[in-house]
């Protein structure tokens, strides 16, 4: 756009939230002599870094599970509950529109139709300019009760759409992740 007259610009508008840093100490102690002389102690010691990674992943999923459980009563940065029908795309400019991440009726992750609807809804989330964010979902987090079945459905080349068998549109495209915390 060609500039005519005085230049126009928008000011940067920011909102903030406090971040609380909390340090945790976690470690394992082993006698050096045991590590050198006992194979079992050495193997256990070697597995410690992996166990820390698993603990970190579990911590993330625990927090996601807590948010899911309290989502309709947890207020977040935009003043809405975590699950709401009126999330502002841009909290400083109401003309940018809103989007919803709330569903009153749960969806079945084992249903290809419901899965397609969820992916479509995620692709409708707006960025701060009111344009579609452009997400491409590739992971589905599943509780124990649904994980094995959904994992097997997503691996099949042909799946049922309710009446006939069709090519699986999610074959090798969606990764199921087991989350026992859900």
Image (spheres, rainbow, N blue to C red):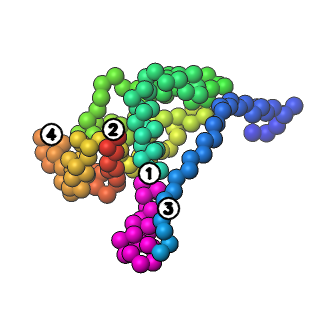
Q: Nearer the viewer, mark 3 or mark 2?
A: 3
Residue for badge 3: 29
Counting residues from the N terminus, which is met first, the one under dot 4 or under dot 1?
Answer: 1
The outermost residue toward the left is 163
- The tag on residue 55 is 1
Magenta region, residue range? 34-55
Counting residues from the N terminus, which is met first, the one under dot 3 or under dot 2?
Answer: 3
> Of helix, strand and loop, which one carries label 2?
loop
Place of residue 178 in the rendered image (x, y in percent of width and height, measured from the top left): 32, 48
Place of residue 75 in the rendered image (x, y in percent of width and height, measured from the top left): 53, 23
Residue for badge 2: 182
Does 77 appear above or below 49?
A: above
Does 104 appear above or below 10?
A: above
Spatial CA span between label 3 and label 1 = 17 Å
Q: Are marks 4 and 1 in contact (CB under 8 Å)?
A: no
Position of the C terminus, as image quadrant, is: top left
> Of helix, strand and loop, which one carries label 4?
loop
Counting residues from the N terminus, which is met first, the one under dot 2 or under dot 1?
Answer: 1
């Amino acid at each position: 756009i060609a500039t005519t007259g005085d230049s126009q610009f928008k000011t940067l508008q920011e909102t903030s939230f406090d971040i609380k840093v909390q340090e945790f100490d976690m470690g394992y102690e082993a006698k050096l002599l045991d590590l050198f002389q006992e194979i079992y102690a050495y193997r256990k010691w070697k597995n410690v870094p992996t166990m820390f990674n698993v603990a970190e992943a579990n911590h993330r999923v625990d927090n996601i599970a807590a948010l899911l459980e309290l989502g309709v009563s947890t207020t977040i940065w935009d003043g809405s509950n975590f699950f709401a029908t009126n999330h502002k795309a841009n909290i400083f400019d109401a003309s940018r529109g809103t989007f919803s991440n709330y569903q009153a009726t749960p969806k079945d992750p084992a249903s290809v139709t419901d899965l397609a609807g969820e992916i479509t809804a995620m692709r409708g989330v707006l960025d701060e300019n009111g344009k579609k964010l452009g997400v491409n979902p590739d992971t589905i987090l599943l509780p124990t009760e649904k994980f094995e079945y959904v994992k097997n459905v997503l691996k099949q080349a042909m799946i049922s759409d309710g009446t006939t068998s069709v090519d699986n549109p999610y074959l090798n495209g969606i990764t199921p992740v087991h989350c026992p915390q859900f």
